[in-house]
Image: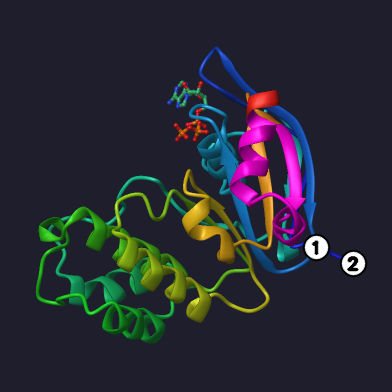
């Protein structure tokens, strides 16, 4: 069976001091994976490498059909001078896998003012737009780097709904975040990185049998 995402002995360097891995992980089933770890653990490095934005020192990353995963970076990626309403057409011209109709319906469901410039949105609104436009691309693997850092709790719930509604049923979604408790229902599985290596991989449902997921992850991080 072809995996949705398979990393074999992956090694990635960042600067002179940091090295990821070697990491071997295989994801066979669709679902949402939480990627956790302390500041500097290597989450962004891993996601950028998986998206082809950092060179691999050694090892391999495989996806079905060799398509690159779709990355939502941890910093805003849309030009600030664009009007919200023009974003679907601009991204549609840029990405072959972009679904303009899905993008328009996502913008509608977020109740964003289409006449506003991206640069005039609040940080949380911009995060909503960035996440929505990433989900408007058709992909089998989505990598979301800190997608919900600036949103208020009500908006966070709305964005969780957005992910639930617009994620393709057969896709793998990896979400890097420091928020565990508020997002627990989202995750099927969790991976914890520590100093560039994999400290823990666990099913979210296993974790909820005794301790909360957050308690389990914190305990693993403190013991590392
Ligand atoms: N552009 C860069 N040049 C050199 N080193 C870098 C660069 N970006 C990150 N690093 C280093 O790589 C290591 C991993 O950083 P990374 O951003 O992947 O961690 P992270 O787990 O995403 O952290 P955070 O939770 O703070 O976002 C850190 O030691 C960091 O200092």
Secondary structure found at label 1: loop
Q: Quadrant of the C terminus?
A: top right
Considering depth in this image, is 169 or 89 the residue closer to the camera?
169
Q: How many numbered marks have been drawn onto this rendered protein structure?
A: 2
Q: In the image, is residue 59 part of the stretch drawn in magenta?
A: no
Characterize the magenta stretch by its predominant secondary structure.
helix
Which residue appears at 74% of the width and 39% of the height?
200
Q: Residues within 10 Å of mark 1 (few under 14, many from 20)?
A: few
Ligand 1 within 8 A of label 1's CB? Answer: no
Where is residue 55 drawn, in percent x and y? Answer: 59, 34
Q: Is residue 159 left or right of residue 23?
A: left
Label ID, residue 195: none
The reply to whether dot 1 and dot 2 touch (C-beta < 8 Å) is yes
Secondary structure found at label 2: loop
Q: Mark 1 = which residue?
A: 28
* Rendered image coloring scheme: rainbow
Relative to 134, is 16 above or below? Answer: above
Q: Residue lying farthest right? A: 1
Q: Is residue 88 left or right of residue 122?
A: right
Residue at mark 1 to residue at mark 2: CA–CA distance: 8 Å
Which residue appears at 33% of the width and 61% of the height?
153
Q: Mark 2 = which residue?
A: 1
Residue range corresponding to the magenta coloring: 198-221
Which residue appears at 36% of the width and 74% of the height?
92
Q: Is residue 118 left or right of residue 22?
A: left
Relative to 121, is 219 above or below? Answer: above
Relative to 192, is 72 above or below? Answer: below
């Amino acid at each position: 069976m072809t995996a949705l995402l398979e990393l074999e002995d992956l090694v990635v360097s960042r600067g002179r001091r940091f090295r990821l891995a070697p990491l071997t992980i295989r994801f066979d089933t669709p679902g949402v994976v939480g990627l956790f770890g302390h500041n500097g653990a290597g989450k962004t490095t891993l996601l950028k490498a998986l998206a082809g934005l950092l060179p691999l020192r050694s090892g391999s990353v495989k996806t079905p059909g060799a398509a690159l995963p779709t990355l939502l970076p941890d910093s805003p990626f849309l030009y600030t001078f664009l009007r919200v309403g023009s974003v679907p057409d601009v991204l549609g011209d840029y990405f072959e896998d972009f679904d303009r109709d899905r993008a328009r319906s996502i913008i509608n469901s977020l109740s964003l003012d289409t006449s506003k410039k991206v640069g005039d949105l609040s940080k949380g609104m911009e995060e909503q737009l960035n996440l929505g436009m990433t989900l408007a691309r058709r992909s089998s693997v989505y990598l979301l780097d800190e997608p919900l850092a600036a949103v208020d709790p009500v908006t966070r719930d709305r964005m969780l709904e957005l992910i639930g509604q617009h994620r393709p049923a057969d896709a793998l979604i990896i979400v890097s975040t420091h928020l565990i408790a508020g997002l627990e229902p989202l995750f099927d599985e969790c991976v914890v990185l520590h100093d560039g290596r994999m400290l823990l991989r666990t099913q979210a449902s296993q974790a909820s049998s005794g301790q909360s997921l957050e308690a389990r992850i914190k305990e693993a991080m403190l013991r590392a």
